[in-house]
Amino acid sequence: MKNKEWQSYKGKKDEELTQDLNTHYARVESLREDLVKGKVKNINEVRMTKKMIARILTLRRERAITTTK
């Protein structure tokens, strides 16, 4: 992920992050189904989507920690 794209995620509100998170979860599920069926051309797309989920969760956690202090 490019730094500019990551900065755009940092500027989003929590509701938008939750919406993006749900979208990525659905994408992973879809990719897993397609992987079993042999429809996925880029196998790394599953890994990249999971990494994006981890980044969003990390960002949400960082915000939760800073708001409690």
Image (cartoon, rainbow, N blue to C red):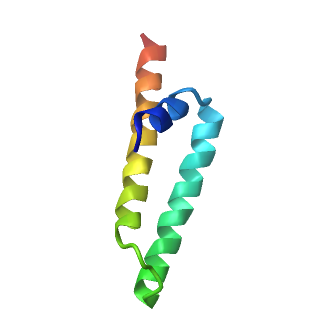
User: Residue at image x 47%, y 33%?
Assistant: 4
Which quadrant of the figure contains the C terminus?
A: top left
Q: In which quarter of the image is the N terminus?
A: top left
Residue 52 versus residue 30 in the image, above or below: above
Outermost residue on the top side: it is: 69
Q: Position of residue 9 (x, y in %)?
A: 52, 34
Residue 18 picture location, percent across and down = 59, 42
* Residue drawn at 41 percent across, 34 percent down: 3
Frontmost residue, 69 versus 27: 27
Relative placement, left or right, of 46 versus 67 is: left
Residue 39: percent from left, percent from top: 47, 85
Percent position of residue 33, x then y? 48, 80
Number of marks drawn = 0
Q: In this view, does 63 lie above or below 4?
A: above
Q: Which residue lies furthest to the bottom in this view?
A: 37
Q: What residue lies at 38% left-to-right and 57% top-to-bottom? A: 48
Q: Which of 48 and 15 is in front in this view?
A: 48
